[in-house]
Amino acid sequence: VSSRLAIWLLLAAVVACGNPQHAAVPAPAHDPLVPELDAIRRLATSAPRAFDVVRSLTDEVGARSAGSPGDKLAVAWARRAMPASGLRDVRTEPVMVKHWVRGEESAAVVSPFAHKLSVAALGGSVGARGLEAQVVMFDDLDALTKADTAGVAGKIVFLDTPMHRSRDGSEYGRVVPNRMRGAAVAAKLGAVGLLIRSVGSDHNRLPHTGMMREAPIPAAALSVPDAELLHRLVARGAPVRVTMTLGAHMEGTSESANVIGEVRGRELPSDIVLLGAHLDSWDLGTGAIDDGAGCAIALEAARLVAELPPPRRTLRVVLFANEEHGLDGGKAYAKAHAGEASHHVAALEADTGAGLVYRIRALGGPGTAAILASLVSHAALGIAADGKPAWGGADISPLRELGVPLVDVSQDTSDYFDFHHTANDTLDKIDPTSLEQAAVYFASVAYELATTPEEMGPIPPAERRSD
Amino acid sequence: VSSRLAIWLLLAAVVACGNPQHAAVPAPAHDPLVPELDAIRRLATSAPRAFDVVRSLTDEVGARSAGSPGDKLAVAWARRAMPASGLRDVRTEPVMVKHWVRGEESAAVVSPFAHKLSVAALGGSVGARGLEAQVVMFDDLDALTKADTAGVAGKIVFLDTPMHRSRDGSEYGRVVPNRMRGAAVAAKLGAVGLLIRSVGSDHNRLPHTGMMREAPIPAAALSVPDAELLHRLVARGAPVRVTMTLGAHMEGTSESANVIGEVRGRELPSDIVLLGAHLDSWDLGTGAIDDGAGCAIALEAARLVAELPPPRRTLRVVLFANEEHGLDGGKAYAKAHAGEASHHVAALEADTGAGLVYRIRALGGPGTAAILASLVSHAALGIAADGKPAWGGADISPLRELGVPLVDVSQDTSDYFDFHHTANDTLDKIDPTSLEQAAVYFASVAYELATTPEEMGPIPPAERRSD
């Protein structure tokens, strides 16, 4: 409370307005929000809280895949965490989610040499009990797509595409179709199972799970060292046989919730800047980087904004249900709030870990370029634009289809895909300083978007669908 | 064959002797072996083979813990690999080994919050089925040793000593007593189970197994992230309860073997330089760094030496059985060869991974300093001595007790304990260039020890026991 008072006094002095709580901040010719952005940085430096948030979520809830006991605990956690971060009008909106369960799982090479394999069923996979078959290896999904049924039928398809590190996550986009569509394509060719090299850039014996679009046959990811071993064995030329047992099964649907809280706007409270992250995680780790970090960024950004004079518009934080396994929360939010879509002046999502922010992108209407230029002009913020359109984020992609303008506050994901969707997604992978820096950037951008007199305007209809 | 011929011709030219195959190499005043050591380096650079050896062992055999099917396959593999590396008189000597089996294992925090824990039973652990108890945490074995029965009886002891990286492996020596003696000390105080923070310097969800001196209660290692989580939970103050199920059990004894091959000495064939490594591995990984790398170093060193004019004495390579779980092979060798202990002019062991060699140490009789000085004087070899006594290695420690002189060719172990005794001990962790460099150093030192007219002489009786 005393730090909030200090900020108020500071801002009162700097902007020299008679009643800062209700009067609009006067708009100088350049960088109108510099005092507020300075205040955000100072607050974050003197008393950072983002790491405390992700520690609380990962220690007190941990794994929280859709429909699991952790999912419900996470919703309760978020209801407590939001008010503690200065958010008001905290409420939940119910979301029905599918409840898929992993069960026990194992796999092994049985010939020409015996090796245990480190595997994780892909999300939605059907089960398998001692399924044994010969392996047929393909470099990628394209090669599989061109294959003949004769070489695939009755076999276990192995998709083996190496993935490198990339700051912008582009490598993930290149390789993830193996996981999303591999099982469907393999099944169409008569395969009895699918193994993919993990969509990950590490070399640990920890496979990367993740959702599939369709799951007609048992499907699992191999850790990268296991995939490299299987590759070498297949490359020797003699038939390689593998066995797999997956306890994976669907337990039906379950009720979860989007959790929503706000910092109410002082002039246009019905106009909204949405800052999202997702509350659910995969089941293998404690969901620290995916997406505990995003939840912490969103809640810490809200706290920092809540310490300032209220922005002109409302900052709405949404912690979405079940991003990982079907985007149920994002779809439910867009459906429930379609009527106020035109009041969403911008949407941002934090779902790329705890890395440093290095870039900003936007996608919207005629006002977009001016707002982006203003965001970039804050030299002290130090973020660069490359002029390409924003992607948004998975949870807010249904809003994109409604024309809601998007802003990407892009984080360095060079090591994100080392840990993403693995048992290794734990608190120790987060650098507290880097996480706090990301929260500062999200807070600064959200505050400016909620306060600037300008608006980006809706995304033109032709650009509302992402790939 | 043609490369061997080239070396012979080269050496014939350089040393200018009439019949290099049978005559002694003339001894110049300084660096008598420079041409041979140059030849070793050239051979290793033009056609390195060490990585092929460890790839063959890890791909074709893989995990090979004592008594397992992989153990027998490894012995057969070594019998084939030795002749291919130029070793002759290849034979096995039987070794009875204990056969411990891990089985299925799991553990979880049940209160105050639910978390799955990533655990691995420690070698020799007895089993447990749904054992549940409160956790009592200690910083290290010393603190546990001073504890009262009242605070420990009926609980699961948690030993939580962080381990850092160290080039010389000294951190392992500092922390490993937790694993070796923790269960015995905890049991004496009435504990019902033991969990240790893994003796490892990584942050992966992959626990480090390893042997215990005594195993009176169920005992397992937590991965480092799990140990950090458990630490934070216990530090909150409320009682923390954990459950563990370990399928671990002893299956009795089994026959394995030390595998031995030689490059016969040209003048003093009964005098031996022993170069050892161990053939067994733990069960979790494929035993690439521990000790596939050492096997590759020993076999590659033998190949390089076998390409040269024969050394004066015999180079004997021994791939020992069951180093990991009781040193059965090392003990059996010392017992079987006690009669020729005085003919072992030096023993070396490669059992610290695939890191670069950076140092040499020796321990022996009155001739030790001169020989060490000569080894160090080969400037092109670039290894430094620090004057401290050699440790030897686990498998050759029983020879130390018989007075056999020891030489340490010390490798950088900075990342060795990231992977040691985990599922992550796989081929991809080995840098082929670094592995080959180590083989060159071992070959060079072994060749000189086998060829120099001097001898170190036996270790004085007072220095024959290691700590």
Image: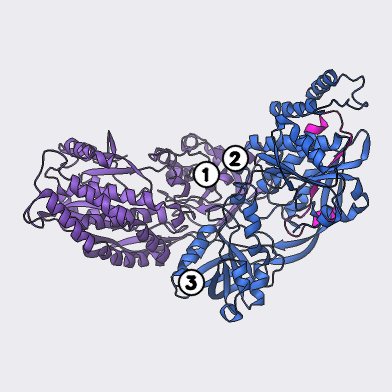
Chain colours: A purple, B blue
Judged from the image, the secondary structure of the residue bearing numbered disc 1 is strand
Q: Who is closer to the viewer here, B122 or A118?
A: B122
* Closer to viewer: mark 2 or mark 3: 3
Residue to which mark 3 is pinned: B110
Instruction: Judge left or right: residue A376 versus residue B215.
Output: left
Under mark 2, the amino acid is: His
Mark 3 and mark 1: span between their CA atoms? 33 Å
How many numbered marks are there? 3
Q: Residue at x 57, y 40 (%)?
A: A136
Q: Is residue B376 above or below residue B241?
A: above
* One can see residue A446 in this view: no
Which residue was labeled with disc 2?
A231
Q: Quadrant of the N terminus of chain A?
A: bottom left
Same-chain check, marks 2 and 3: no
Q: Which residue bears the numbered disc 1?
A: A197
Magenta range is B304-333
Can residue B219 be found in the magenta stretch? no
Looking at the rendered structure, the secondary structure element under dot 2 is helix
Residue B170 position in % (x across, y down): 64, 53
Q: Position of residue A27 (x, y in %)?
A: 10, 44
Q: Are marks 3 and 1 in contact (CB under 8 Å)?
A: no
| Residue at x 43%, y 70% (from the top left corner) | B236
Residue type at the position of mark 1: Arg
Helix, strand, or loop for circle 3?
A: strand
Of circles 3 and 1, which is in front?
Answer: 3
Give the image location of residue A61, x and y in percent.
Answer: 40, 65
Q: Are marks 2 and 3 in contact (CB under 8 Å)?
A: no
